[in-house]
Amino acid sequence: MEEIKLQQALDANLIPVPDNRTSFDANCPVCGGKKKMNYNLGKNVCRCNKCGRAFNAVSLHAFLNNIGTKEAYKELMGGNLQPSESKVIPAAPVVKQSRRASTDKIHAVYSSMLLKWKLNGKNRKDLLRRGFRPEEIESLGYGSLPSSMDDLSVKADFIKSLELDDFSGIPGFYVSKKGNWWLKTWKPGTVMPMRNINGKITTLQIRKDDDLIEADEGKCYYITSRDKEAGTEAKQAVHYACDFVTLEDGSKTIDVGNGYMVLTEGVMKADLYHAITGMPTLSIPGVNCLTCLKQELPKIKRAGVFRIRIAYDMDRYENILVLEALEKLKALIRKFDLEYETVQWNDIYTVKDSEERLSEEDDFVILADDDNIDGNIKLLPRIKSLGKKRILFSRKDKDEPVSRESYMKLSAECVKNKLVLLPVIWNLSYKGCDDYVAAQFRCAG
């Protein structure tokens, strides 16, 4: 059976491919995550960093058209099990990439860049609003990608100022058509260094300025030069927001304190949580990005960590995708014989004028103002399969109207799935662990 190229499935389903790109991000057709689905034409696969769904060409076409994989294969091959000339798509152009440079070289170049990309007043004000203190911002080494980098002469002068002849292997740099080393940048924003277990910068992530984020875009992006001549892709990586101690050989490693480590998602979130609590914190790029975490768990165990405190966003109580990702994370942690617990906040709900706490093991929340009641009903078997016993039908306050028809419909389906339905009042005031500690200890928000 001849291999179907991912390009064929994209063309068949009218999914546009950016010019001269062999890898690009777009909205996920499964969960709707903005710019979360990565299409890799070179590897002929695609994967969503939010919901974790992955496809090859045939399975993608089957999913998009609600058909079986055999039928999808026939359609992509022009209706036959033999190749059809009309359906054969030329292979995407192969761009020679540079092998990733050593960590020391990447750290040196990125550190030099951050010294030149001084944090501007706009981004500093935003960090202070979130709860950071001035000395913490200085210690983290955050910078700002200036809009002036769009100017070719400014960018050329910037690259020259780094005083390096060979940028091969540094994500973000590539060889231009003129044969010069060049730097790929996008929208201005706050530049956040991502550090490894030894405190070295391995990746630069940029959080775009709020006024520059388009409706269908994600908030953050890596400095990367995939699909560029002699460029290097910035691979997904964890970030250590920790205090570091110097070893006898002069190298650094994390200070694990009492052996507990917090795990969350997002660079800035981890940095702020650590700055306020002092807890060593590890962040992953997304709740389903466990491949890079798998490589780090043995390292933190050797460093003295024995218990992980999982601090995924509290919407895990109402988001089935986050809940399923949480279960995968727990299974992964167990494989390395590490202990874990989940961190909760904003977990008080009201039922019949008395206050109760959300149960991590038993409860799942469906919002009363959610107009997708039929969609939620379809989720009940999945919710049940994750061990949940109760559905909390939640209003934000006692005056919020509730559709009796929706409630009765949901109630009947809960009975079928042997789930208890309980009307409650619950308001998710603080979604992330950083928001919560900032509000409690810094009066930020």
Image (cartoon, helix red, strand yellow):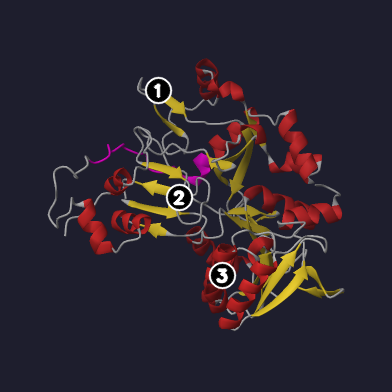
Please say whether residue 202 is visible from this viewpoint. yes
- On the question of residue 365 being in view, the answer is no
Ranked by sequence position, the earlier of labels 2 and 3 is: 2
Query: Spatial distance from mark 2 to mark 3, Cα to Cα?
Result: 26 Å
Mark 1 burial class by Cα count in 10 Å: few <14, some 14-19, many 20+: few
Residue visible at 52% across and 69% down in the picture: 378
**Part of the protein shown in magenta:** 91-106
Query: Under tag 1, what secondary structure?
Result: loop
The answer to whether residue 104 is above or below residue 266 is above
Q: Position of residue 72 (x, y in %)?
A: 26, 58
Residue indicated by mark 3 = 377
The quadrant holding residue 176 is: top left
Badge 3 amino acid: Ile
Q: Nearer the viewer, residue 60 or 188?
A: 60
**Mark number, residue 37:** 2
Task: Point out the image quarter for the N terminus.
Answer: bottom left
| Residue reaching furthest to the front | 405
Q: Nearer the viewer, mark 3 or mark 1?
A: 3
**Left or right: residue 232 compared with residue 70:** right
Q: For the view shown, which residue lies furthest in the bottom direction?
A: 418
Residue 408, picture quadrant = bottom right
